[in-house]
Amino acid sequence: MSELITAALVDLDLTADTKEAASRALAERMRELGRVTDLDGFLADVAAREAQMPTGLDGGIGIPHCRSAHVTEPTLAFGRSAARVDFGAPDGPADLIFLIAAPAGADSDHLTILSSLARRLMTPEFTGALRSAEDAGEVAALIRGEEPEGAARARPEPVTRIPDGPEATLAPETTPAPEATPAPEAAPTPPEAVSPPVSPLFRIVAVTSCPTGIAHTYMAAQALEQAAREAGVELAVETQGSAGFVALDAEVIARADGVILAHDVEVRDRARFAGKPVVDVGVKAGVNRAAELIAEVREKAAHGPAPEPAGVPSPVPMDAGAGAGDGFATRLRTWLMTGVSYMVPFVAAGGLLIALAFAIGGYEVNKAPSVASHFVWTESASWAALLFQTGGAAFGFLVPVLAGYIAYGMADRPGLVPGFVGGAIALTVNAGFLGGLIAGLLAGAAVLAVQRVDVPQVLRGIMPVVVIPLLSSAVVGFLMFLVVGKPVASLQKALTDWLAGLSGANAVILGVILGLMMCFDLGGPLNKCAYAFAVGGLAHPNDGSLKVMAAVMAAGMVPPLALALATTVRGRLFTAAERENGKAAWVLGASFITEGAIPFAAADPLRVIPSAMAGGAVTGALSMAFGCTLRAPHGGVFVVPLIGAPFLYLVAIAAGVAVAAGSVVALKSVRRPAMA
């Protein structure tokens, strides 16, 4: 592993006059050393991170940073600007500019080094040394934490810390406890260093976190620690950074008189702080207003404000760090992304198992008896059935997991029970993917509504365990069974009857309609309705019903294949997780598993779903126009021998994939969403 920063990554005469130009100048040094593989792609990730919130800090510091797939190893470049560059700091432009680049899978050792830098930026001795240094090698050594040879000490002695866990700063000067005891009782301070004692000792616990988990997380912790020393209070900080975190000890939380949450992403396990006075702010407030936050939490504790309901956060956890200008659409996307992030492993595992099953056993594997009652160790068909049924079991969790974790994103852990229950009901009433989305949102809303009810102190302990799951699940069950389920079932029946009436009409128009339905909800009610219509026709096959089956399967393959192609040709428009999902989508799409596009649609429905529908309509129309037929109800490219006019069939699929992928790329290029 190369050094984090070298003299070649230091520019003591940075001439850039904008933050974009400054980032590019420093990034070019990274590229010259082979630390950045795609300059434009990396700068796009830097800009996306900057768009979330400015990276300028008080004291003339700019610290643009991001995690990017275009970075080969953790790297830091430093520039000193006489002209100063505006990074949005409250006190004006910056003359000290740090560009931090971390790969998507950065290791914890280097992230700890980055967090150490972030802390030292809060000390005037360190920043003063950087401003006065005349040699690039000296600056690089200072940033690495080394003492330049022959140089006077320009920075404080390093402090022993638990780098990514709760760190106790005991007023006014005691050092943190050893790692084995992360949150001990306050130790007596040496008499010569004692300030007038605070009696009784006021104790605060804090959590800091930022979207990237590299810089602001640790800078806020350092600022709070310094302010705590000056105020003469005891402070234990939990830094939820990229290098992982060690949770605050339960006894430390129990003894705390107040809580400071300085964060821009969800605070993990927030229910621990129930019943305590809480000051809840963005992470930059922790950096810039640490002393005010400590004074505010002390005031809240003194006035005895009504604490949060036990085990329940207020406000919504995923909204707690949102900027003041973030609207409902931004929060909705965050909630959906929470559900998708937990659902993706089920999509990948289940879809690939089903694809392998078709490859080994052919399309008829879906009719195999249960392997629990019939399994022959020496027959490939039995192994294929085992893979298919295991993959089907994994796919059975998609909608409940999606709904459960959407509710979790809205209401934290209390949302899990009603969310999973609502998702399971969505499957029961055949509401599918869209039903899962609705169930998750209903569950989160139900929990938040119950949380707003003021209950006596004696009941608060059972709220998260008994009352909230009971009431919210009952509400969600009522809505899903009696309000949402019936309209969806009626819609399915009406669409099936309508399609049956179109069978003898214009084949191309029917292909367009089937393609739109297959791609609208990606495995949901409309998709299943069109598929059921096609499969039903195979009971008494004729030329028309075989054409319908071919058009349905072809259109259903388009969304995942199109998203896989889009992530390949324009990867920088997608997050690192989406690019990984794109690799699996190739196989899922080729296997006619339309659900492979769900992660993309849930994250960005207004761009992905219309694009997929356009591609599906083109494929459905061409398949019908070419007269392609299909005798298998499933299988994707693995059943090509059973397709009539197979070459033209593949042409129809390719055309639709090209249209959908091109549409997604074009729409995302117009207004690229910010990525963490």
Image: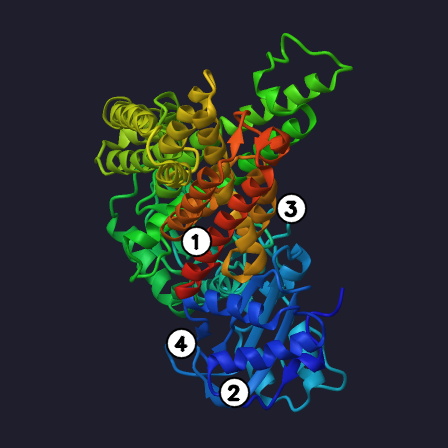
Q: Are marks 1 and 3 in contact (CB under 8 Å)?
A: no
What residue would you read off at disc 3? 180
> Could you tell whether 659 is left or right of 133 in the image?
left
Contact between marks 1 and 2 (CB within 8 A): the answer is no
Residue 274 appears at what percent x and percent y? 36, 40
Residue at the location (25% across, 44% down)? Answer: 306
- How far across and how far down the image is residue 673, in percent? 42, 60
Indicate the secondary structure of the residue bearing disc 4. loop
Q: Which is more N-terminal, label 4 or label 3?
A: 4
Residue at disc 3, secondary structure: loop
The correct choice, above or below, for 297 with respect to 418 in the image is below
Query: In the rendered structure, which amino acid carries the disc numbered 3?
Result: Ala
Chain-order first, disc 2 or disc 4: 2
Going from N to C along the chain, the mark reached first, 1 or 3, is 3
Above/below status of 526 relative to 516: above
Q: Is residue 60 visible?
A: no
Tell me the CA gap for discs 1 and 4.
20 Å
Q: What secondary structure is found at the residue carrying circle 2? A: loop
- As measured in the structure, the alpha-carbon distance from the residue carrying label 2 to the one carrying label 4 is 16 Å
The residue under label 4 is: 88
Marks 3 & 4, CB-CB < 8 Å contact: no
Instruction: Tell me whether circle 2 and circle 4 mark residues in contact (CB < 8 Å).
Output: no
In the rendered view, tell whether residue 89 sits above or below residue 214. Answer: below
Local crowd at mark 2 within 10 Å, few (<14), some, or many (≥20)?
A: many
| Residue count near mark 3 (Cα–Cα under 10 Å), binned few <14, some 14–19, many ≥20 | few
